[in-house]
Every structure is written in C-alpha cells, then in structure tokens.
Amino acid sequence: MSSPNLIKHEKFPSRYLRNRRDLIVYLPPGYNERADRPYPVLYLHDGQNLFDGSTSFIPGMDWHVGQTADNLIYEGRVEPLIIVGIYNAGKQRLGEYTPTRAPKLGGGRANRYAKFLLEEVRPFVQSQYRVSGGAERTGIGGSSLGGLVSLYLGLKLPKVFGRIAALSPSVWWNERVILRFAAAAPVHPHPRIWLDAGTREGGRTVEDVERFRDVLLGKGWQPGRDLHYERVEGAEHNEAAWAQRVGPFLQFLFPAG
C-alpha cells in the first residue's frame, strides 16, 4: 500500500498563544479524485506523535494514524475523513492543554488554546481543504493531557465538536477538576465520546477515568450509542499503547455508512 497522503504546514502562527507550531494534515484515499465531496474532520493534539516516528516524543514510536485510517477506509469500516494533527508547543504544552491553573504545576490556558483552534486553525483548514460543516462532522481528540483538553473543549463546545476521542485522559489534573466541570456543564447535544484507560498506566488512572465515565452515564450518555469506554488490560501510558486504539476509536466515532 502506498504511504498516506500527508501535507505539512510549518510554523503556523497564533496571535492568541503568541507562538508557532506545525500542522500536519491527513487526506483520505480518493480525496483528489472527488473534487466536490466534503469530508468530516478530526483535530488531534500532540501532532508530532501521530504520523511519523522520527518526530515522535519517543523516537520511532508513533500512533500510525495515517496507515490505520487508510486501511480502515479501504476496508469500508471508517468513513473517509480529514485528520489534522496539531503539534504541541513543547514547554507550553502543559499550559495549553489544561483548563485550570494548579497551585504547583501552573497551567490553565485551555480557553486560549480553544480560541487558537476555533479562530485560527479551523478557518485555515476550512479554506485549504474540503471540510464538512456541523458538529456531528467535527471531532477532537488526544491522549493524556491531550485527552483532558479534548474532553474539556468537547463538553464546553458541543455545538462545535460532536465527536471526542479521549485516550488515557489526565482526569487527575488539579484535584480532578474535570469531574466537577463535566457534572455541572449543560451539554447539548451530547457529543459521541470514546474514553479509555490502560491497566498498567500507574496511579489511579483507571479509577479516575471510570469516575469520569460514571459522570457521563449520570448525565444520560448511553454505552454503545454515544459513549464507548474501554479498559485496556496491560496497556501502558505511551504512544505504542495509544496506537493500538486508533482503529477502534475511528470506527466508533466515524463509522462508515
């Protein structure tokens, strides 16, 4: 199989965050043949870890998002979609991916990161690529702190993001503030959410993520319909583990047909 169709936009600037980062865009098979067809779009954080082992946090260990999406689209199991990998900003990652400021750790710039996504990245992607409108055609996702910010922004902006992938989300952040936020948030319509945790991630990851799942169940999410929770036996907190879950979460969030 040929390599995935990836386009890199280097040093994309943000006036909200006052920095620059690369964006990497995956185009599905057949994109160039169908000039009239719009596609759903999935925005993923930590873009350097998604497609290329040479740019990954741990060299050689990436999520293989491009190959996985290609295979599932060719097999007719996932709807053809555009995937936008947004690189993290290195030392500023913790700040941008956290909704509140924690006493010792800092953070709390997720609302500013949201403006960057909504008012800078999204209009650029819509101007360059054939993207469908509407929340039900727009997803957001990530792992660890990237999973945390995906849950926060997805629940805060359900009329923008109708699909959320939260892999091993950092529910622990700032005394589990995301649990209180989710419990209080008036979320309509309900986004479709993929939630998971590995049993070898250490700490109370599984317990925390299951508490978050229970908050969603209490607010009316229904397993199998708009919520999928996966407890992954033996999975650690790293890119190799998350790579195994790309296919399953794509099939749940963007099923073909």
Image: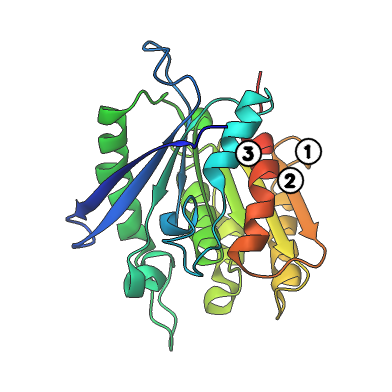
Q: Earlier in the sequence, mark 2 or mark 3?
A: 2
Q: Is residue 97 above or below residue 249?
A: below
Q: In the structure shown, which secondary structural element does the residue marked by tag 2 occupy?
A: strand
Is residue 236 toward the left or the right of residue 10 in the image?
right
Provide the residue designation for mark 1: 224
Task: Give the CA distance from mark 2 to mark 3.
Answer: 12 Å
- Residue 1 image point, x, y percent: 58, 32
Above or below, 36 against 15 in this view is above
Mark 3, residues whose alpha carbon is within 10 Å: few (<14), some, or many (≥20)?
many
Residue kind at label 1, given as amino acid type: Gly
Of 138 and 101, nearer the camera is: 138
Q: CA distance from mark 1 to mark 2?
A: 6 Å
Q: Secondary structure at mark 3?
A: helix
Whether label 2 touches label 3, CB < 8 Å: no
Mark 1 burial class by Cα count in 10 Å: few <14, some 14-19, many 20+ = few
Q: Quadrant of residue 250?
A: top right
- The mark lying in front, picked from 2 and 3, is 3
Q: Are marks 1 and 2 in contact (CB under 8 Å)?
A: yes
Q: Which percent across, then down, holds residue 74?
A: 63, 25
Q: Which residue is mark 2?
A: 228
The kind of residue tagged 3 is: Leu
> What residue lies at 27% left-to-right and 57% top-to-bottom?
21
Residue 31, percent from left and from top: 43, 21
**Marks 1/3: CA–CA distance:** 14 Å
Q: Which residue is mark 3?
A: 250
Residue 237 in view here: yes
Asked if residue 187 shows in the view, the reply is no
Give amino acid for label 2.
His
Left or right of 254 on screen, residue 217: right
For this view, does 63 lie left or right of residue 205?
left
Which of 257 and 159 lies nearest the eye of the viewer? 257
Q: Which mark is residue 73?
A: none
